[in-house]
Image (tube, helix red, strand yellow):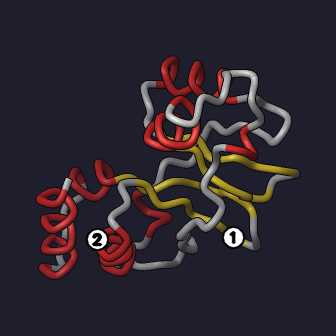
Amino acid sequence: MQTAQDIMTKDVQYCTPLDNVYEVAVKMRDLNVGAIPIVDNGRLIGMITDRDLVIRGIAERRPGSNSVMDVMSKDIITVSPSTSIHEAAELMAKHQIRRLPVVEDGKLVGMVSLGDLATNRYSDEKAGEALSEISQLH
């Protein structure tokens, strides 16, 4: 059985609570990603997505100098490295998320994206069904 650790991106770029919204946006642009984890002393404390920047940032007239703490999502769905890719896909489908942080002992160790699941060869048909469900709803 394949696990999150088998397919996750291990070198995840992140920002800290000391960063501002502008710095997050620049990092997203430079890395061509839609989400940046917020990490404090190695621990995952939140995530900012491109949607968060629009909804909680621009639409609420918050300037780019605003703290990431004001814009980030705090209730993050995570998995452990040993979580099966089937379970990871089901969580992503259930919560309608495209990125799933992989956390071990509270520390960010990787990220599983919808793309990671799509490019992986599933042996489990249910995981593939969950992936299809995410794709159809977005």
Element carrying mark 1: strand
The image position of residue 38, as x and y in percent, is 70, 47
Task: Rate crowding at label 2 as few (under 14), some (14 to 19) or many (20 or more) other CA atoms within 10 Å.
Answer: many
Q: Which residue is labeled 2 in the image? A: 93
Count all numbered tags in the image, as a single digit: 2
Q: Residue at x 85, y 35 (%)?
A: 18
Q: Residue at x 33, y 52 (%)?
A: 116
Q: Which residue is labeled 1 in the image? A: 104
The tag on residue 28 is none
Left or right: where 125 falls relative to 14: left
Q: Residue at x 15, y 70 (%)?
A: 128
- Contact between marks 1 and 2 (CB within 8 A): the answer is no
The image position of residue 106, as x and y in percent, is 75, 69
Left or right: where 41 falls relative to 16: right
Instruction: Relative to 45, say whether 122 is above or below.
Output: below
Is label 1 or label 2 in front? 2
Q: Kindly identify the amino acid type of the residue bearing the numbered disc 2.
A: Ala
Q: Kindly identify the amino acid type of the residue bearing the numbered disc 1.
A: Glu
The image position of residue 125, as x and y in percent, is 12, 79
Task: Rate crowding at label 1 as few (under 14), some (14 to 19) or many (20 or more) other CA atoms within 10 Å.
Answer: some
Q: Residue at x 11, y 59 (%)?
A: 136
Element carrying mark 2: helix
Left or right: where 134 falls relative to 12: left
The image position of residue 13, as x and y in percent, is 62, 36
Distance, label 1 to label 2, CA atoms, is: 22 Å
Q: Earlier in the sequence, mark 1 or mark 2?
A: 2
Residue 87 falls in image quadrant: bottom left
Q: Quadrant of the N terminus?
A: bottom left
Residue 133 falls in image quadrant: bottom left
Left or right: where 132 falls relative to 33: left
Instruction: Relative to 115, say whether 63 is above or below.
Output: above
